[in-house]
Amino acid sequence: MKFEENKLVEKIGVKVGFVMSYSIFSAVLSGIFVLSNKFKGEILYSIDSSLLITLLITVGGVIIKRYLQ
């Protein structure tokens, strides 16, 4: 008997992995901002800026990936 791979589970796994890595990277970057006193105690501003920086890195990576294909 030959079993086919379940592509739906693989697609869901890729998306969940992306969201988890995005969250972890943003949390680490936000922690670095808070510990470096870059924003002088404005934690919400550092979280927003870390999410924006992570989003820009992600969009840049997607653009480069599509350009190279």
Image (cartoon, rainbow, N blue to C red):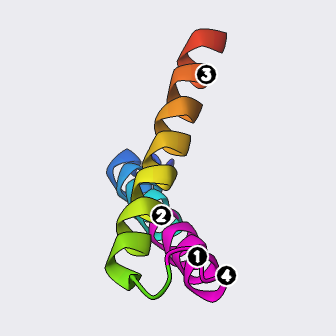
Magenta span: chief secondary structure: helix
- Callout 1 crowding tier (Cα within 10 Å): few <14, some 14–19, many ≥20: many
Which residue position holds label 2? 50
Q: Percent x, y for residue 4?
A: 45, 46
The answer to whether residue 13 shows anywhere in this view is: no
- The boundaries of the magenta stretch are 22-39
As helix, strand or loop, the secondary structure at mark 1 comes to helix
Q: Earlier in the sequence, mark 3 or mark 1?
A: 1
Q: Earlier in the sequence, mark 4 or mark 3?
A: 4
Quarter of the figure with the C terminus: top right
Q: Amino acid at mark 1?
A: Phe
The answer to which quarter of the image holds residue 67 is top right
- Callout 4 crowding tier (Cα within 10 Å): few <14, some 14–19, many ≥20: few
Contact flag, marks 4 and 3 (Cβ < 8 Å): no
Contact flag, marks 1 and 2 (Cβ < 8 Å): yes
Give yes or no for residue 32 being in the magenta stretch: yes
At 43% from the left edge and 48% from the top edge, which residue is drawn?
55
Whether residue 26 sits left or right of residue 11 in the image: it is right
Give yes or no for residue 43 being in the magenta stretch: no
Q: Earlier in the sequence, mark 2 or mark 3?
A: 2
The answer to which quarter of the image holds residue 42 is bottom left
Instruction: Work out how far the residue at label 4 is from the one at label 2, CA to CA, in angstroms.
Output: 13 Å
- Callout 3 crowding tier (Cα within 10 Å): few <14, some 14–19, many ≥20: few
